[in-house]
Image (spheres, rainbow, N blue to C red):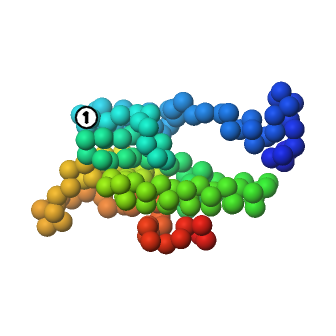
Protein backbone atom coordinates (compact mmCIF):
# COMPACT_ATOMS: atom_id res chain seq x y z
CA UNK A 1 0.00 0.00 0.00
CA UNK A 2 1.62 3.25 -1.06
CA UNK A 3 2.02 5.97 1.51
CA UNK A 4 -0.23 9.03 1.24
CA UNK A 5 2.54 11.05 -0.42
CA UNK A 6 3.76 8.31 -2.79
CA UNK A 7 2.69 8.86 -6.40
CA UNK A 8 0.29 6.22 -7.77
CA UNK A 9 -0.24 5.09 -11.36
CA UNK A 10 -3.46 7.09 -11.56
CA UNK A 11 -2.37 10.19 -13.46
CA UNK A 12 0.54 10.91 -11.13
CA UNK A 13 -1.81 11.61 -8.22
CA UNK A 14 -0.78 10.88 -4.67
CA UNK A 15 -2.90 8.35 -2.81
CA UNK A 16 -4.37 11.17 -0.73
CA UNK A 17 -5.32 13.19 -3.83
CA UNK A 18 -6.85 10.13 -5.45
CA UNK A 19 -8.95 9.21 -2.42
CA UNK A 20 -10.08 12.84 -2.00
CA UNK A 21 -11.70 12.60 -5.43
CA UNK A 22 -13.82 9.61 -4.47
CA UNK A 23 -17.30 10.81 -3.54
CA UNK A 24 -20.07 8.82 -1.94
CA UNK A 25 -23.31 8.71 -3.88
CA UNK A 26 -25.53 6.87 -1.45
CA UNK A 27 -25.11 3.62 0.39
CA UNK A 28 -27.74 0.94 -0.15
CA UNK A 29 -27.15 -0.67 3.22
CA UNK A 30 -27.45 2.48 5.34
CA UNK A 31 -28.77 5.75 3.93
CA UNK A 32 -31.07 4.12 1.39
CA UNK A 33 -32.37 1.71 4.00
CA UNK A 34 -33.23 4.61 6.31
CA UNK A 35 -34.87 6.50 3.42
CA UNK A 36 -37.08 3.46 2.82
CA UNK A 37 -37.98 3.26 6.51
CA UNK A 38 -38.83 6.96 6.61
CA UNK A 39 -41.10 6.59 3.59
CA UNK A 40 -42.74 3.45 5.00
CA UNK A 41 -43.33 5.26 8.30
CA UNK A 42 -44.72 8.27 6.40
CA UNK A 43 -42.22 10.63 7.96
CA UNK A 44 -42.11 13.64 5.66
CA UNK A 45 -40.16 16.86 5.25
CA UNK A 46 -36.64 15.43 5.01
CA UNK A 47 -34.04 16.42 2.47
CA UNK A 48 -30.90 14.70 1.26
CA UNK A 49 -27.69 16.37 0.07
CA UNK A 50 -28.57 19.46 2.09
CA UNK A 51 -25.75 22.01 2.29
CA UNK A 52 -25.01 21.91 6.00
CA UNK A 53 -21.85 21.44 8.06
CA UNK A 54 -20.91 17.77 8.33
CA UNK A 55 -23.06 16.81 5.30
CA UNK A 56 -25.84 15.04 7.22
CA UNK A 57 -27.53 12.11 5.47
CA UNK A 58 -30.99 13.51 6.21
CA UNK A 59 -32.08 17.01 7.22
CA UNK A 60 -35.45 18.38 8.31
CA UNK A 61 -34.85 22.10 7.71
CA UNK A 62 -38.15 23.18 9.29
CA UNK A 63 -37.36 21.32 12.52
CA UNK A 64 -33.59 21.99 12.47
CA UNK A 65 -32.86 18.26 12.77
CA UNK A 66 -29.88 16.52 11.16
CA UNK A 67 -29.56 12.74 10.99
CA UNK A 68 -26.27 10.98 10.34
CA UNK A 69 -26.08 7.26 9.62
CA UNK A 70 -22.61 6.26 10.80
CA UNK A 71 -20.87 3.15 9.53
CA UNK A 72 -19.59 0.99 12.37
CA UNK A 73 -16.11 0.67 10.83
CA UNK A 74 -15.55 4.31 9.80
CA UNK A 75 -16.83 5.78 13.06
CA UNK A 76 -15.35 3.24 15.47
CA UNK A 77 -18.44 1.59 16.90
CA UNK A 78 -17.59 -1.06 19.46
CA UNK A 79 -20.47 -3.33 18.52
CA UNK A 80 -18.50 -6.55 18.67
CA UNK A 81 -18.14 -6.99 14.91
CA UNK A 82 -14.30 -6.83 15.17
CA UNK A 83 -13.94 -4.48 12.24
CA UNK A 84 -10.45 -3.09 12.86
CA UNK A 85 -8.02 -4.34 10.21
CA UNK A 86 -4.82 -6.03 11.33
CA UNK A 87 -2.68 -4.49 8.59
CA UNK A 88 -1.80 -0.83 9.15
CA UNK A 89 -3.76 -0.95 12.42
CA UNK A 90 -2.14 2.23 13.73
CA UNK A 91 -3.08 4.16 10.60
CA UNK A 92 -6.69 2.94 10.80
CA UNK A 93 -6.96 3.75 14.51
CA UNK A 94 -5.77 7.29 13.79
CA UNK A 95 -8.23 7.66 10.88
CA UNK A 96 -11.16 6.41 12.95
CA UNK A 97 -10.17 8.65 15.89
CA UNK A 98 -10.06 11.59 13.48
CA UNK A 99 -13.54 10.72 12.18
CA UNK A 100 -14.92 10.52 15.72
CA UNK A 101 -13.35 13.84 16.64
CA UNK A 102 -14.86 15.43 13.53
CA UNK A 103 -18.26 13.95 14.45
CA UNK A 104 -18.06 15.61 17.88
CA UNK A 105 -17.09 18.98 16.35
CA UNK A 106 -19.94 18.78 13.82
CA UNK A 107 -22.46 17.87 16.54
CA UNK A 108 -21.34 20.81 18.65
CA UNK A 109 -21.46 23.26 15.76
CA UNK A 110 -24.97 22.16 14.80
CA UNK A 111 -26.08 22.43 18.46
CA UNK A 112 -24.60 25.94 18.65
CA UNK A 113 -26.70 26.89 15.62
CA UNK A 114 -29.85 25.66 17.35
CA UNK A 115 -30.07 22.29 15.65
CA UNK A 116 -30.65 18.82 16.99
CA UNK A 117 -28.55 15.85 15.90
CA UNK A 118 -29.38 12.16 15.68
CA UNK A 119 -26.53 9.72 15.01
CA UNK A 120 -27.57 6.22 14.06
CA UNK A 121 -25.19 3.28 13.94
CA UNK A 122 -25.25 1.11 10.83
CA UNK A 123 -25.76 -2.03 12.98
CA UNK A 124 -28.69 -0.47 14.89
CA UNK A 125 -30.39 0.35 11.60
CA UNK A 126 -30.08 -3.29 10.55
CA UNK A 127 -31.04 -4.88 13.89
CA UNK A 128 -33.56 -2.42 15.37
CA UNK A 129 -35.23 -0.35 12.61
CA UNK A 130 -38.27 0.41 14.80
CA UNK A 131 -36.00 1.92 17.45
CA UNK A 132 -34.29 4.05 14.82
CA UNK A 133 -37.62 5.40 13.58
CA UNK A 134 -38.73 6.12 17.16
CA UNK A 135 -35.49 8.00 17.80
CA UNK A 136 -36.02 10.15 14.71
CA UNK A 137 -39.67 10.81 15.62
CA UNK A 138 -38.75 11.67 19.21
CA UNK A 139 -36.22 14.21 17.95
CA UNK A 140 -38.59 15.69 15.36
CA UNK A 141 -41.46 15.97 17.84
CA UNK A 142 -40.02 16.26 21.33
CA UNK A 143 -42.46 15.79 24.19
CA UNK A 144 -41.87 16.06 27.87
CA UNK A 145 -40.29 13.05 29.53
CA UNK A 146 -43.37 12.63 31.71
CA UNK A 147 -45.72 12.58 28.67
CA UNK A 148 -43.62 9.90 26.95
CA UNK A 149 -43.14 7.70 30.04
CA UNK A 150 -46.07 5.49 29.09
CA UNK A 151 -44.53 4.64 25.70
CA UNK A 152 -42.71 1.30 25.66
CA UNK A 153 -39.98 1.46 23.07
CA UNK A 154 -36.51 -0.03 23.09
CA UNK A 155 -34.02 2.32 24.69
CA UNK A 156 -30.82 1.09 23.05
CA UNK A 157 -28.45 3.94 22.41
CA UNK A 158 -28.28 4.50 18.66
CA UNK A 159 -25.70 7.23 18.36
CA UNK A 160 -22.10 7.83 19.26
CA UNK A 161 -21.01 6.14 22.47
CA UNK A 162 -19.21 9.30 23.58
CA UNK A 163 -20.82 11.96 25.71
CA UNK A 164 -20.70 15.17 23.75
CA UNK A 165 -19.49 18.20 25.59
CA UNK A 166 -19.31 21.22 23.35
CA UNK A 167 -17.18 23.14 25.84
CA UNK A 168 -14.21 20.80 25.51
CA UNK A 169 -11.22 21.35 23.28
CA UNK A 170 -11.71 18.57 20.75
CA UNK A 171 -8.23 18.84 19.27
CA UNK A 172 -6.81 17.03 22.27
CA UNK A 173 -9.10 14.01 22.05
Q: SS class of the residue under badge 1?
A: loop
Left or right of residue 132: residue 167? right
Q: What residue sits 25% from the left and 53% below the top?
A: 138
Is residue 158 visible to the viewer in this orientation of the structure?
A: no
Left or right of residue 75: residue 42? left
How many marks the image carries: the answer is 1
Residue 76 lies, in percent from the top left, at: 58, 58
Q: What residue sits 25% from the left and 41% below the top?
A: 62
Left or right of residue 78: residue 129? left
Number of residues whose C-alpha sits closer than 10 Å to that of mark 1, classed few (under 14), some (14–19) or many (20 or more): few
Q: What residue sits 86% from the left and 31% below the top?
A: 12
User: Vertical placement of 21 versus 99: above or below?
Assistant: above
In which image quadrant can residue 47 be found?
A: top left
Residue situated in front as seen by the camera: 170 or 132: 170
Q: What residue sits 54% from the left and 48% below the top?
A: 71
In which image quadrant can residue 107 be found?
A: bottom left
Residue situated in front as seen by the camera: 2 or 33: 2
Residue behind mark 1: 44
Is residue 87 visible to the viewer in this orientation of the structure?
A: yes
User: Vertical placement of 49 versus 116: above or below?
Assistant: above
In which image quadrant can residue 96 be found?
A: bottom right
Left or right of residue 142: residue 100? right
Residue situated in front as seen by the camera: 52 or 141: 52
Residue 43 lies, in percent from the top left, at: 25, 37
Residue situated in front as seen by the camera: 95 or 21: 21
Amino acid sequence: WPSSSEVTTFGRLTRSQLMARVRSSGNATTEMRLAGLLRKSRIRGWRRHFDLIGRPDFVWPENKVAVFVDGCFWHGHKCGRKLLPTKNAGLWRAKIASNRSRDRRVNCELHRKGGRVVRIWECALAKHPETVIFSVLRTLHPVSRRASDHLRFPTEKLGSDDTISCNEDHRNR
